[in-house]
Image: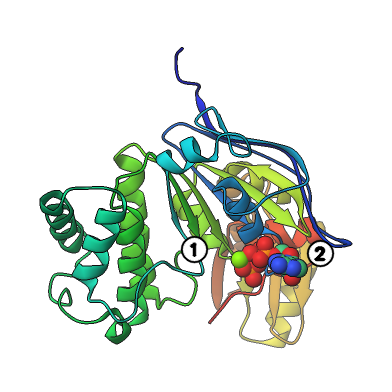
Amino acid sequence: MAKSDVVIKAKGLQKSYGKTEVLKGIDIEVKRGTMLALLGPNGAGKTTTVRILSTLLGFDKGTVTIEGHDVKHDADAVRKVIGLTGQSAAVDELLTGRENLVMMGRLYRLTKDSAKARAQELLEEFDLVKAAERPAKTYSGGMRRRLDLAVSLIATPPVIFLDEPTTGLDPRSRIAMWEIIEGLKQKGSTILLTTQYLEEADQLADQIVVIDGGKVIAKGTAKELKAKVGKDRLELTFATDSSFKAATKVLGTLVQESDPDEKTVTVVLKDTNADVRTVLDVLAKEKLKFDAMAVHKPTLDDVFLSLTGKQVKEEA
Ligand SMILES: Nc1ncnc2c1ncn2[C@@H]1O[C@H](COP(=O)(O)OP(=O)(O)OP(=O)(O)O)[C@@H](O)[C@H]1O
Ligand SMILES: [Mg+2]
C-alpha cells in the first residue's frame, strides 16, 4: 500500500480531566515533509494534544493515526516512527551530553559503536562538541534545549513532535533553534510544533492551527490568517499639533484612526503602493510635513486578537 500523503491525522479529538473538558474536538492534519504549528496561549491544550498524538496520554473521543498507525491500538508502531521533545525532557542531569546521547542510542537498540558514532554526529550538528564531556546540569538554557532535541533525534525519526522548543530561550538561541528545526524539515521529517510565539509559527510553519480553550479557532497558512484580519496600515506622525490637525482634516475619510496625544494618523491601505502615493500627494499639495511614516503589515498577533479578543502574552 502506498504511504498516505497525510502523516499526522487527528479527528474529533476530545479529552477531559474529570469534568474539565480540555480538548473539545480537535482536527489536525499534517502532510508529509511539512511543518504544522499548533499555536495557542497558556492552557489552550497544546501539550495535551502533543502527548496524545505521541501515545503518552489516552483520550476520550476521536481518532488519531500517525503514518497510518492508530495511536490507541497500535501504539508500538507509532512509537517507532516518532521523536518527541517536550516541556518535560528526557535528559539525565548528571550524565554528560555525550553520555546522554549514547545512552539514548542504546535504548533505541543501536550497537555500542553506532550509538557512539551517532552521538558524535549530533554533538557536531548541535554545536555541543565543546560541552560534550560536561554534565547536562551545567548547561545553559539554550544548550540544554539543543541537547534535548539531539536526544530525541538519536534514531532520526520521520515524524517529530516539538512542544514549545524555544520558550524561554534568548533571541539568539531561538534563531539557532529555528535553523536546527528548519534543517530537520529539509531532511524530510514531518513536524508538529507547538508554540505561543506567533512570530515562530510565521517563520517556520507551512500550516498553522490556532487553538484556544481546547478548540480550533482558525487554520491556514500565515498568509491566509493574516489576510483574514485585513490590510496594511500607514501610520503618519506629525511634529506639531497644527500639522496633525490639518492632516487629519485634509485626509478626511481616508483616516481610520487619529491619536492627538501621539499626533499620529492611521490610514488603512487597500492598495498599498497606490494609497501611500495618494496620501503623500494630498499632504504635499497642502505643504504638510510629517515627522515619521511607517507601513504596518498585519501580524499573527492581530489575527489572534481579532479571533479571540485577547492578546497573546509574549515573553520579553
Ligand atoms: N493532569 C491534569 N489534570 C487536570 N487538568 C489538566 C491536567 N493536565 C492539563 N490540564 C489542564 O488542561 C488544560 C490544557 O493544558 P495544556 O498543558 O495542554 O496546555 P498548553 O497549551 O500546553 O499550555 P502551556 O502553553 O502553558 O504549556 C489546562 O487548563 C490545564 O490546566
Ligand atoms: Mg504546554
Whether the residue under disc 1 has CB within 8 Å of ligand 2? no
Residue that appears at 54% across and 75% down:
292
Contact check, label 1 and label 2, Cβ < 8 Å: no
Q: Position of residue 118 (x, y in %)?
A: 17, 53
| Numbered label attached to residue 309 | 2
Answer with the quarter of the image where residue 306 lies.
bottom right
Amino acid on which the number 1 mark rests in the picture: Gly
Answer with the quarter of the image where residue 271 lies.
top right
Left or right: 281 in relation to 211: left
Local SS, label 1: loop
Answer with the quarter of the image where residue 101 lies.
bottom left
Local SS, label 2: loop
Which callout, 1 or 2, points to the residue nearer the camera? Answer: 1
Q: Position of residue 92 (x, y in %)?
A: 34, 74
Residue that appears at 39% across and 74% down:
171
Q: Can residue 235 be seen in this view?
A: no
Left or right: 133 in relation to 293: left
Residue that appears at 74% across and 87% down:
261
| Numbered label attached to residue 86 | 1
